[in-house]
Image: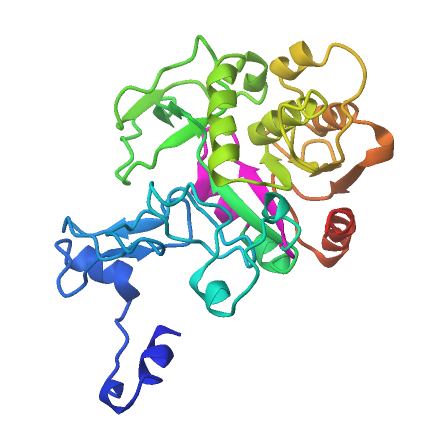
Amino acid sequence: MASAYIRSKGEEFENVYQLSGGIQRYLEAFPEGGYFHGKNFVFDHRISVPSLQDKTVGCCYSCKSPYDDYTPRLRCSMCRMLVLLCESCKASVPYLCELCAANQHSSEPVESGRDKCSKLRILCLHGFRQNASNLKGRLASLSKKLRRTAEFVFIDAPHELPLLYQLLEDETRQEPTAQPHKKFAWLTDPDGPKASTQTWTPVQKSFNPMQYQKQTSGWSESWEYLGQVLADRGPFDGVLGFWQGAAVAAILSSLKDAGLIDIKFVVLCSGFVSPVLEQQVLGGLIDCPSLHIFSGKTGYDRQISCTESERLAGKFRPDSRMVVRHDSGHIVPTRPDYLEQYSEFFKQFL
């Protein structure tokens, strides 16, 4: 697309070539930037990848001062395109992107940016010992097939976990040589290992599928962090959680009645009832529309039993919940029969 755009500018731009591997591979080969100036915009939680050059080539759309930070994720109130505004100018709302402003769209405020948005915005919470990239890859097929219905936003949890690898019985297994990727959690075991350095730590214990019962610490920090995410990157129509993320999404939904969070629905995939939720919901059912997706066969999901996911579904009002039981494991399946049910649930919020 960029090549076609440049060529459309006239005869002086005929000699246009594409880089093999793109800018990302170019920056890996030339960390100082080479002939590339600025930052490479990427479509994941990193937002942009800079070179070692400390040079800002972007500018604020409003005042034109040097600025290139899309982290606040300010969006046009008409088309939802990201808008680049500096700290001084972002106080002026509503936001309009360059194209909407050029086409003289009305700048009247749009309620929470939702009325003009044709897609649902869904905040996605990953599972225990995972990260935003893990969940984005896991939901890649779902995101693609529902691209006309929903925009999925992925974030890392605030609690960093130590990097662990399991020793064999004879303790001969060597430390992994792969570059470690940070792992996170929303809730942690107060007696579990703490993150210290980004190096691998050997453990002799095998995976314990009941470990979630001990994950009782860290909610106050996660709630504060999520509140900031909702304020800075919202609004969101719903929250999707996978595994521990589903348990946390259920906690968030329980806060809806108290007016502490403004969401329309939750999607809970391979979820379970967290001890934190048990403490907050002492009686009654959660009054928030919910879609529950989990394996309906015992033993298929080795991370969390279907009994626990059924128990979580039972915490929600039956007249506003939908339960999709699939015949796979620890995944979110995207077969046409399942997609039809997902779409039926989302349709009521469009």
Q: In which quarter of the image is the N terminus?
A: bottom left
- Residue 150 position, x and y percent, is 62, 52
Q: In this view, does 280 lie to the left or right of 39?
A: right
Question: Which residue occupies 72% across, 31% down?
Answer: 298
- Residue most extreme to the right: 319
Which corner quadrant of the image does residue 204 belong to? top left
- Residue 182 position, x and y percent, is 35, 33
As drawn, 174 above or below 24: above
Q: Can residue 135 be seen in this view?
A: no
As drawn, 145 above or below 345: below
Judge whether residue 53 is colored magenta: no
Total label count?
Answer: 0
Q: Range of the magenta residues?
A: 117-139
Question: Which residue occupies 27% across, 71% down?
Answer: 20
As drawn, 347 above or below 271: below
Judge whether residue 127 is colored magenta: yes
> 55 or 340, which lies in front?
55
Question: Which residue occupies 79% across, 24% down?
Answer: 314
Which corner quadrant of the image does residue 321 belong to? top right
- Residue 145 position, x and y percent, is 63, 59
